[in-house]
Image (cartoon, rainbow, N blue to C red):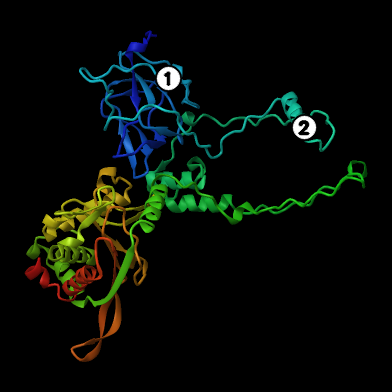
Amino acid sequence: MTTMTEASVREFKMPDVGEGLTEAEILKWYVQPGDTVTDGQVVCEVETAKAAVELPIPYDGVVRELRFPEGTTVDVGVSIIAVDVSGGSAPTAAPAAAPAPAAERQPEEPKAEGSGRQPVLVGYGVAASSTKRRPRKGAEIPAQEPAAASAAVQAELNGHGTAPAAAPVPVAPAPALAAPAADRPRPLAKPPVRKLAKDLGVDLASVVPSGPDGIVTREDVHAAAASAQAPVPPTAPEPVPAAAAAPATAPAQAPVASYDTARETRVPVKGVRKATAAAMVGSAFTAPHVTEFVTVDVTRTMKLVEELKRDPDKYGMQGLRVNPLLLIAKALLVAIRRNPDVNASWDEANQEIVRKHYVNLGIAAATPRGLIVPNIKDAHDKTLPQLAEALGELVATAREGRTSPAAMQGGTVTITNVGVFGVDTGTPILNPGESAILAVGSIKLQPWVHKGKVKPRQVTTLALSFDHRLVDGELGSKVLADVAAVLEQPKRLITWG
């Protein structure tokens, strides 16, 4: 076996995969010690506060050690994997079960020539610091030795003066450990399904797949979780011998509350949900929100959608997805062009209003990882076909869980389509740093006065929330009225847009 020197070992550090992020959780390792890796090969998937990201290794070599197991939150700049780049073979070792001492896992990495900083994959990381370890679900709890356990029990009882020292308490032997994960076939499942199983505490290896080619689906995971939470029938208590009964002089003890664990499930708040919660709380209690509503007859808009679907070649929409959200997005962009002051942000530090001369249009998307808001960059410059293409890519990427942190940064105005859930409308909370958000309700057939007669028409309700520091009632009303006017008469897209 080739002898490896520390000089041939490269330490790949947790990169800063998004602006301002300081940590990420290791969701999945795709390599193990002894595996050969090549430059650009994905070695693991990590979750930040904004997205799940796959990390490629930046050099060729053989994996020597995984510094942290799955489920560990690691600070940016801390080494997560060691790779031997000398060309020799690495000794086969079990996957990392715990991080090695700092003195053993922080060999000096050669610095970039002419630079005092060490380059990482995406950006320069912060100084290495201690990592935060989270308990993994189903983790084995090591059994104490009998003598140590009895000593602990005696020390606690004697220290509190509640009972005399007792005889050593026998401890049951630890159960046999399960076979190593490397020896079991890896279940087939998509990343969102794996994330769901992890959140629900379901072992994918124990789930019976129902998808094509043996793929585990979301329904399979939910079924396994429900089965695991089914209550166990209570068994009759064994009779207590008279000799073992407590003496009559023993003090009465308060009854211990008992809860049925199948009645509730606790899900750790982390990643996207944690970041979303913090952002929404900060926005709600920082920006003074005002919400205005308007009910709109969108019958002509719905007819235009059908026309674009029937004859896509006529309008340059070949192969593109056309839906009401596309025209609503275009209508909002037209309204912003007519009322540019609504597209701004509040600079608290400098006490300035920053007016944006571009529109990065955010689209709120519900995903298995939580609510995310990627945005279409420079949406104001896009034609209707270009906007349709960008919107289709944004939605597909979000559903597959591949939205990058960069796609969720720099938004200026957002649309949230609550109508897809059958909701009439809502009072949306602004995304931090943005001045307005438009909620679109469900489109329903309703009686409506049209040309002096009551007729069935396609109707929806729009709600615009805005930051009252930036947008006064007049400006907000003009923006909402313009969006409604375009949707009532979509031909105005041609004359106004």
Count numbered badges in the picture. Answer: 2
Residue labelled with disc 1: 105
* Crowd around label 1: few <14 · some 14–19 · many ≥20 (10 Å): some
Question: Which one is closest to the eye, mark 2 or mark 1?
Answer: 2
Q: Quadrant of the C terminus?
A: bottom left
The image shows residue 40 at horizontal and vertical percentages of: 26, 29
User: Residue placed at 17% from the left, 54% from the top?
Assistant: 356
Q: Is residue 35 visible?
A: yes
* Crowd around label 2: few <14 · some 14–19 · many ≥20 (10 Å): few
The image shows residue 412 at horizontal and vertical percentages of: 23, 55
Q: Is residue 300 above or below residue 214?
A: below
User: Residue placed at 39% from the left, 9% from the top?
Assistant: 1
Marks 2 and 1, how far apart in space? 41 Å
Residue type at tag 1: Arg
Q: Secondary structure at mark 1?
A: helix
Residue type at tag 2: Gly
Residue labelled with disc 2: 159
